[in-house]
Image (cartoon, rainbow, N blue to C red):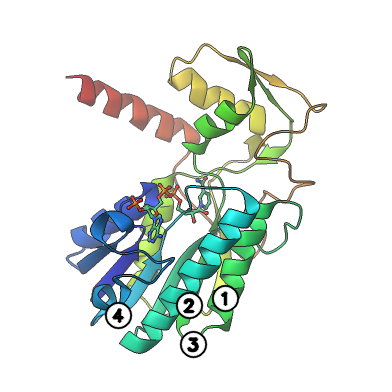
Amino acid sequence: MRIVVAGGTGQVGRMVVEELQRRAQAVVVASPSTGVDATTGKGLDAALEYADAVVDATNTPDLSGAAARRFFEDSTSHLLDAEARAGVRHHIVLSIVGADRVTDDGYFAAKGAQEDLVKAGSTGFSIVRATQFYDFARRIAEWNTKEDTVHLPSKHVQPIAASDVAGALAELALGHPLNDAFDFAGPERMALPEFVRRVLRRDHDPRYVVDDDATAPVGFNISGDLLLPREPMRVAATTLESWVHDQGRRALVGAR
Ligand SMILES: NC(=O)c1ccc[n+]([C@@H]2O[C@H](COP(=O)([O-])OP(=O)(O)OC[C@H]3O[C@@H](n4cnc5c(N)ncnc54)[C@H](OP(=O)(O)O)[C@@H]3O)[C@@H](O)[C@H]2O)c1
């Protein structure tokens, strides 16, 4: 099969490319650094020639609500139009848990708008709504640090390994469209401060992480349990413990 990975140079996209290549598929990486811009449509027709499926793992560099909406609406519209011209059978998009229900966060609403376009399009589709990636704990910490302390509310999350997400996207690209969406989460539910604390500890990051329900968290100002997966859902295998262990092993190999 010939599969195009839009955003194939990004964190998840790169792993999707590797997984598909491991399975001996023909893969085209479509991102600005390979001359393809989904927000303008530049290079898309050439990239999608003879493609069977497109995986959309793009992300916007500007996560603010208005910019994110513009990015996901423009890129998704251009991708779907180019897919229709090229006769692509299957569009697989990486979305985020809560995108279909969160209304008080611009980025999540933009991902919801992206999903709506995909559902209304003429290409068969599969939508994977992933929870927060384990690595994302570092970004959460960055956003919520005051002096040397990370302040986070004690709400629960169920984060996932980006590699599990990439594996699921690759698997879907080789199959038939679901014409549906599912939530995809890691195997354990935990409090947000505990999640971030465990990743920072692995990094030997000296910052304290405190439970603080009084502050509005940056990047997580989303009410209730909207970040938790709901049915229909699938559960990935990699635990935070084994991901942390694997990161440590990679760091050791890299240091040699
Ligand atoms: N982080 C999380 O915890 C999380 C959780 C659930 C879902 N997600 C979703 O996962 C998706 C991928 O996130 P990520 O962190 O893997 O992204 P990332 O590492 O920031 O990579 C973004 C990718 O998008 C590409 N891109 C940017 N502008 C583009 C354009 N105009 N046309 C085509 N490609 C473009 C980039 O290409 P260049 O390298 O060439 O710039 C890069 O390959 C996002 O849609 C996000 O909503 C993330």
Q: Earlier in the sequence, mark 3 or mark 1?
A: 1
Task: Determine which quarter of the picture holds residue 189.
Answer: top right
Look at discs 2 and 3 and give the one toward the viewer.
Answer: 3
Check disc 3 and give the amino acid type.
Ser
Check disc 4 and give the amino acid type.
Asp
Q: Name the residue under label 4.
A: 52
Q: Mark 1 points at which residue?
A: 117
Task: Determine which quarter of the picture holds residue 155.
Answer: top right
Residue drawn at (51%, 30%) of the image = 138
Residue situated in front as seen by the camera: 214 or 35: 35
Q: Mark 3 points at which residue?
A: 122
Look at discs 1 and 4 and give the one toward the viewer.
Answer: 1
Check disc 2 and give the amino acid type.
Phe
Residue situated in front as seen by the camera: 66 or 100: 66
- Label for residue 64? none
Q: State the image coordinates of residue 142 (x, y, percent, origin top left).
A: 56, 27
